Amino acid sequence: MPVKAPAKSKQGGGGTSSLKVGKGRPPRVSMGGAKVALKDDIRDDVTEIGEGGHGEEWMQTKSLIKPDDQLDLSEGELKEEFTRILTANNPHAPQNIVRYNFKDRSFKQTSHVDQLAIHFSLDGNMIHKDSDEARRQKAKYGAAEKYLFTKRMKSGAVSDQAISEAEEEKKDEEGEEKAEVEEGADKRDEESTPAPPKGGDNKKLTNQFNYSERASQTYNNPYRERATQTEPPPRANFSATGNQWEIYDAYKEDQEKQAEEKAKEKKQTSSKKEEGTVKKKLTAMETQTDDVSRISHAAKIVERMVNQNTFDDVSQDFKYWEDVSDEYRDSEGTLLPLWKFSYDKAKRLAVTSLCWNPKYRDLFIVTHGSYDFMKQSRGMLLCYTMKNPSYPEYVYPTTSGVMCVDVHPEHPYLVAVGFYDGSVGVYNVTNKDNKPIYQSTAKTGKHTDPVWQVAWQKDDLDNNLNFFSVSSDGRVVAWTLVKNELTYTDVIQLKLDEAPQEGPEGTQLTPLGCGTCFDFHKQTDYLFLVGTEEGKIHKCSKAYSSQFLDTFDAHHMAVYKVHWNYYHPKIFISCSADWTVKIWDHTYKNGAMFTFDLGSSVGDVAWAPYSSTIFAAVTADGKVHVFDLSINKYEPICEQAVVQKKKTKLTHITFNPNHPIVLVGDDRGYVTSLKLSPNLRKVPKDKKGQELQRGPEQEIAKMDKLLALVREPSNKDN
């Protein structure tokens, strides 16, 4: 029987001992023989035990002992309820996860924490028999069994007993179907079994008989043997001396025999009349191609030798001659014109880019296009060598102007180019085809404005080749060569500081800057600079594209070139259409370290690969300016006109990595090679007159010395 609840105690006269129980702690019960008299006996209703005195210990009064450290709580505190709510949050999930926010440049706590805790998970392949999927499978397999049974019954392969059993099963199924009809006729029509396919047993049926009814016995056929006996082959002893020409003659005879056998096979397959005409054409073409292929290498060597004899005086100047008059000049130097490279079909096109091959130091690539957007027609990619200045080694005509080029440092046969129509491409010089092996289209994310510069980068994590491009549409894009496709990823968009403009239907359009050039740091892979048409230079990172690392208000007009120093990791140079060339320290934000006004629009500037303080620039008035900051910090040590001043503008310049020459391109399609005089590449001397050692550490120290002189006045002001 259920246990009754104890009666409530009433307060009466006289001294009473109140029993208080600590909150959250059960009272201790003593089951000993001592009895404690309480005013209100608290007894439990228990069933009476039979005679014999059994169960007397249950009849004894239970005494409650109060511990010494038990709290004394009032009745209100005892009746106080504490509500505990059961939530779906995981108590073991961390609540203090923080992540670095690149936009705000600070650590922020992550609000979203995964509260799901999976204790057990098991995927099965069982489905409920009353589900739609189970009915569809039953209908599918039932139709297949019925079709197989009727087919075997027609062929007589099924016994009468099996037919009778099938009929009984059919009757049972019909009974079940009648019961299902009452539930709904529409449902039965939807789930009716499909008819067997007509015209041919296309579907392979599974074997429904997995046992053998009758024993089978096969015959073991006797083995048959057949032996033949032949005479041994005749033997003969032969000895001779094997020389190189005898081996060669033997191979030649074998090749002639194989050629004769192939010719006989062709005669049998083709008719006699067609054979005569086709054979004559094939033999004529084979002899011509064989003759050309055999003498092509020799013809190229002879052509280079003829050119070397023709330009013998220029070759002697390039290799041996030095300007003796430099000894009588304090610090000035000269540029000696050597060869002039030109191609008839590219004379009306401007030289848009120059690039030396990283492996073959005498080979360089020239791209032709037009900087006048009103006169855009075609372009050209030419590969020249100094061993043959009269004609290019490779010629690649293009439908659009080629604006930039870069050769892969590890694969010198891969050439990346950017076109005026916004597309980029990759050429393989070893292929005979004049078309690029990769080219971007409107579907594959090409630029909407001309591509002004491309640059190869290190392979990605999947060892895929990739290069970057910058365009006037404000995008810096990374292109990856994946199998036969050219995939792209937007690295950064050159946003302006202006307020967003209102577009159609109330949309906000963010104005983008026009990228004109960029350059990647020589030591830090993720760091690169971007020059814009607005005159600003942005320092960016490959890691994120939300904002710039820093912005330099460099020039008042378009920036045509930015170039990191080969030796000093903090220094870069820039040139612009505002007639100036500036040298910057990317960690110094108070302005440029050096500023030079050249009196005309500066088309290109380049650091010398052999010194950290020498650079050269070309201007629109046809002059080449060479500076050496260690000798003169204010003026160029060489200023020389190399083309006609009023008719021709110089567009680009580049130093050869090994030889003391520079290449200069103009807007008429000519490339001029110039040799630097000894004063333009001399090694600085110490106070005792001894030449200082050259090396990266010495070059960095030389540049740091100049920077200390420049920064000294600003430090004093501070």
Image (cartoon, grey):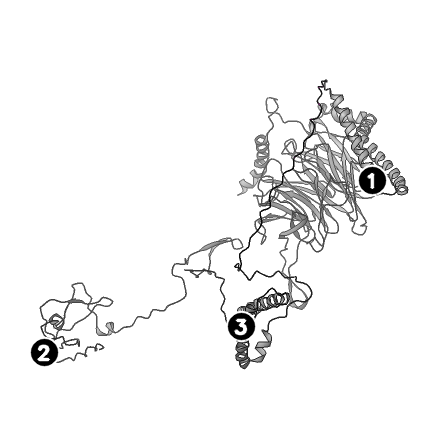
Circle 2 residue: 14
Counting the numbered discs, the total is 3
Q: How far across and down, in percent of the image, does residue 604 sit?
A: 71, 41
Front residue of 35 and 425: 35
Q: How far across and down, in percent of the image, does residue 106 sit?
A: 49, 53
Instruction: Determine the main secondary structure of the stretch shown in magenta.
Output: loop
Which label lies toward us, 1 or 3?
3
What secondary structure is found at the residue carrying circle 1?
A: helix
Q: How far across and down, in percent of the image, does residue 602 sit?
A: 72, 42
Front residue of 392 and 522: 392
Q: Is residue 235 magenta?
A: yes
Specify start and end residues of the magenta stretch as a single range. 218-238
The furthest residue to the bottom: 182
Gap between marks 1 and 3 measured at Cα: 70 Å
Which label lies toward us, 2 or 3?
3
The answer, for residue 314, to whether it is visible in the render is yes
What secondary structure is found at the residue carrying circle 2?
A: loop
Q: Is residue 546 magenta?
A: no
Residue shown at the point (46%, 58%) measured from the top left: 110
Amino acid type, label 1? Lys
Circle 3 residue: 169
Which label lies toward us, 1 or 2?
1
Circle 1 residue: 266
Amino acid type, label 2? Gly
Q: Quadrant of the N terminus?
A: bottom left
Query: Which numbered disc flags the more N-terminal residue, 1 or 3?
Result: 3
Residue shown at the point (56%, 73%) measured from the top left: 167
Front residue of 100 and 363: 363
Q: How far across and down, in percent of the image, does residue 272 sit?
A: 89, 41
Residue shown at the point (81%, 27%) measured from the top left: 302
